Amino acid sequence: MARWAGHRQKSRLQKLVLFLVSGYLFIVWNREGASKYMLEVPANDGFHVIPDYSNPRNGPGENGLGVVLSGEEKKIGEDQMKTMFMNVVASDKISPDRSIPDSRSRECRNIESSYPKNLPTASVVIIFTDEFFSALTRTVHSVVNRTPQHLLYEVILVDDNSQREELGSKLSEHLKRFGSLVRLIRSKERLGLIRAKILGAKAARGEVLVFLDSHCEANTGWIEPLLARIQEERTAVVCPVIDAISDGNMAYLGGSHGGIGTFWWSLHYSMGSLPKSEIERRKNPATDYIRSPTMAGGLFAANREYFFEVGGYDEEMDIWGGENLEISFRVWMCGGSIEIIPCSHVGHIYRNGHPYDMTGRNNNKDVHGTNSKRLADVWMDDYKRLFYVHRMGLVDTDVGDLSGRKALREKLGCKSFNWFLKNVIPDKFIPDEDVLAYGHVEGQNSMCLDTLQRLENKGPIILGIYNCQRPSSSAQMFSISKENELRREETCVDVGIETKDGVRPAKVVQCKRNDFVEFEHEKGKFLKHKKTGLCLDMGGVSAGGDIYFQKCDENRPSQNWIIDKYFT
């Protein structure tokens, strides 16, 4: 068993550094307003004991198992899922030091001893606002327990103006066990995740910044692969594999490293499969890093100096949303890389909502939209047109001064967004480039094909029809690809299974790279499904209804379609 208090020499050095840093922060923060921040540094050397995980542990949630509730506790937990978006009753029963299964591959375990001994030190920065006490403390304990002592320079917690009572003196008292290893910075005003991260990063003094969400569990051997890759490539911004932790019973479910981060033109993050080029590049699939166009944004590591050299975060972005794509595009375009490290695993509680207020400055309820507009206007060049297809209402919205970020782009000599599309994510479908047709697909009576706001990214949906919404409505924009697909950004139109009344619905499914759903089409005529010979028909369907396929008939005007723009 190891005790952090045993490292007296390191502790004395840290105290000296903390004294100097605290003085620096005092001066800086006084300039910003003396009442904004409060830095808490425990006076003692700590008394936390790292568990010996080789010994069996008993208790709720141990070994990553889910917590089973019954009776009144079960009902309370179910109610919490609706309002708090996680089962706090279950979480509170679990030890902050709980054991979890090692989710690394056998190949990753085999190379564990091969990492350099002189890896850079890490400052782990954790931002929270009104996080649940047990989830937050389990995050901190997992980092301390599973990070080699010589690599963990510090853990910095930034409290973004939490109002939950248990995050006050109770948290401060709990953190004393870690001594000067863990610092708590409290903001007396709401900064939002983005600016709180900047505050934590500026306070950090380790060679590498590691950002974690406040509801995580670091797994065995999690940090060495991240630090080793950054030591090897200074401009690599690296992400662990994010293992899922159940929001319902807190079971540690593990994860897969078989994908990459991508994006929707609406500037939401998404996941995609490994492209062929990346599969061929990686000689050791279980251990080699994965080049990823984007990252989820909550969990990543970067050389501290490089993080600020490449622009840190856009400080004018508000609260949360869009910052992950902004830093992803920027790093790639300005000479760095975003990578996923298969041998680093961190568990994360995926929640279906935010248990805290996401309203931005000036009562802004659309922080993702305004943040994304800043990103689009600075980094996407003419391709921002595809973002505005989704967010026409933001075209004339004032999102603040962009001159500083544009100057940064010029200073760093960053490449174009076209370069990013061609070199980093060449498989990304561009709806209005290299296609046969694009725009609204209009039938009779000024009615257009429409997804009816159904969530096509959640699985197959039925295609509908609605009054044409011009100049644009993202739900009505379709392309005829050069492979003759009738498609959207990631989904394609296909023929559904015949229903009881003999109707073949038009369904929208995930496009397949090498199995194209082909259509035949001439301007103002059929949209004919080549494989079945059936034609898209809107006969008898009113606005908001589902359309279907049936036998082609030249005498049925309900089978005639015209698309806004043809390129042939």
Image (cartoon, rainbow, N blue to C red):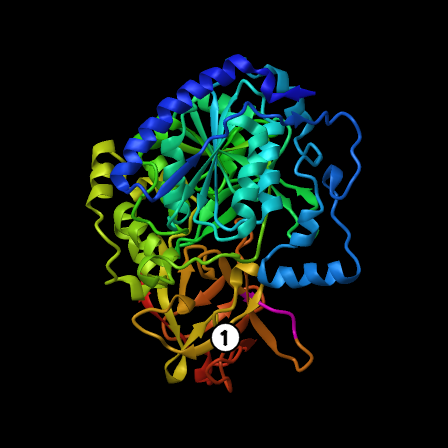
Let me know if residue 232 appears in the view: no
The answer to whether residue 223 is left or right of residue 497 is left
Quarter in which the C terminus is drawn: bottom left
User: Toward the viewer: 432 or 273?
Assistant: 273
- Of all residues, the one furthest to the bottom in this rendering is 540
| Residue at image coords 46%, 46% | 262
Q: Is residue 536 above or below residue 385?
A: below
The answer to whether residue 23 is left or right of residue 168 is left
User: Toward the viewer: 43 or 269?
Assistant: 43
Q: Specify the segment rendered in magenta.
A: 494-498
Determine crowd level at label 1: few under 14, some 14-19, many 20+ residues with C-alpha closer than 10 A: many
Quarter in which the N terminus is drawn: top right
- The amino acid type, in three-letter code, at marker 1 is Gly
> Pointer 1: what residue?
464
Q: Residue 135: where, in percent of width, then height?
A: 60, 45
Say which element carries label 1: strand
Magenta span contains residue 170: no
Q: Residue 248: where, in percent of width, then height?
A: 67, 54
Q: Residue 257: where, in percent of width, then height?
A: 59, 37
User: Toward the viewer: 524 or 510?
Assistant: 510
